[in-house]
Image (cartoon, rainbow, N blue to C red):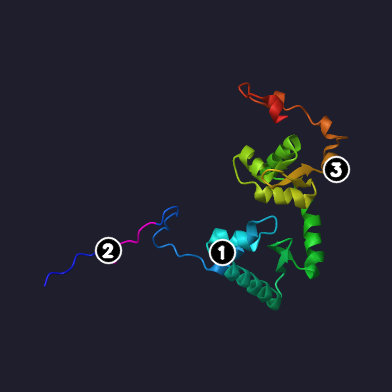
């Protein structure tokens, strides 16, 4: 008897790529849902909704919601220094109230250290382009600026200034403490950038 020809893909061969989906690297294990949620929530600067997380991770919203609640209960039961809270329609990590004193002491003592070059660059962008989003600061610097922006917030040099009407991104501006530290009465006293820019830079007015 003659064997029938296979009508589909070779079951022993590699799986076909799903249109619109980036193929996984061979040998790289997919993180668990719990690990993926923790990784995302560690880098966000505002609460993230369950539906958004479900879409990014390509998992059912109900499963994501249940896992978030399991993680929150687990952190509380273990007495961690942080907890996972559902606020403003989303989820985010927060330090626990009982740890407030040590966090405040760390922040206060940390203000005695000098700003890094990266933090000074980000602060300069905010000062001259405010109100400005983190993404815009990163685009101008050419490198991710989330960490240094958090540092500037912690130091009290910048603060939130509403949201962008189009992208809904959080906007930032400098604070009165920033003016105090620089000995300025207002932002109008910031030095003109033109003398410090290369001769071939166009649209200087847009930068200032």
The residue most toward the right is: 185
The residue most toward the top is: 199
Task: Assess whether mark 2 and mark 3 are in contact (beta carbons under 8 angstroms).
Answer: no
Span shown in magenta = 7-17
**Which of the numbered marks, if any, corresponds to residue 118?**
none
What residue is shown at x 74% (from left), y 34% (from top)?
Answer: 128
Give the image location of residue 126, x and y in percent: 73, 40
The residue pinned by badge 1 equals 36
Q: Secondary structure beneath disc 1?
A: helix
Specify few, some or many for label 3: CA neighbours under 10 Å numbering under 14, 14-19, or 20 or more: some
- In reply to whether residue 4 is colored magenta, the answer given is no
**Which of the numbered marks, if any, corresponds to residue 10?**
2
Which image quadrant is residue 37 in? bottom right
Report, in whole angstroms, how far the alpha carbon at label 1 lies from the one at label 3.
39 Å
Give the image location of residue 14, x and y in percent: 32, 61
- 106 and 77: which one is in front? 77
Predominant SS of the magenta segment: loop
Report, in whole angstroms, how far the alpha carbon at label 3 lies from the one at label 2.
67 Å
31 relative to 46, above or below: below
Which image quadrant is residue 158 in? top right
The residue pinned by badge 3 equals 176
71 relative to 178, above or below: below
Q: Secondary structure beneath disc 2?
A: loop
First reached walking from the N terminus: tag 2 or tag 1: 2
Of badges 1 and 3, the one in the foreground is 1
């Amino acid at each position: 008897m003659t064997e029938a020809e296979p009508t589909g893909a070779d079951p022993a061969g590699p799986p076909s790529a799903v249109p619109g989906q980036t193929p996984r690297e061979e040998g790289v294990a997919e993180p668990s849902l719990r690990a993926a949620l923790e990784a995302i929530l560690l880098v966000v600067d505002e609460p993230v909704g369950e539906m958004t997380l479900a879409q990014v991770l390509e998992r059912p919203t109900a499963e994501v919601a249940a896992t978030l609640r399991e993680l929150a209960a687990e952190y509380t039961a273990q007495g961690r220094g942080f907890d996972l809270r559902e606020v403003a329609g989303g989820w985010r990590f927060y330090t626990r109230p009982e740890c407030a004193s040590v966090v405040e002491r760390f922040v206060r003592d940390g203000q005695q250290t000098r700003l890094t070059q990266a933090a000074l660059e980000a602060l300069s962008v905010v000062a001259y382009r405010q109100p400005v989003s983190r993404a815009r600061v990163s685009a101008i610097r050419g490198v991710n600026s989330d960490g240094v922006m958090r540092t500037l917030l912690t130091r009290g040099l910048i603060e939130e200034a509403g949201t962008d009407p189009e992208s809904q991104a959080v906007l930032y501006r400098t604070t009165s403490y920033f003016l105090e530290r620089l000995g300025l009465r207002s932002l109008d006293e910031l030095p003109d950038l033109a003398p410090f820019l290369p001769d071939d830079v166009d649209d200087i007015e847009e930068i200032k």
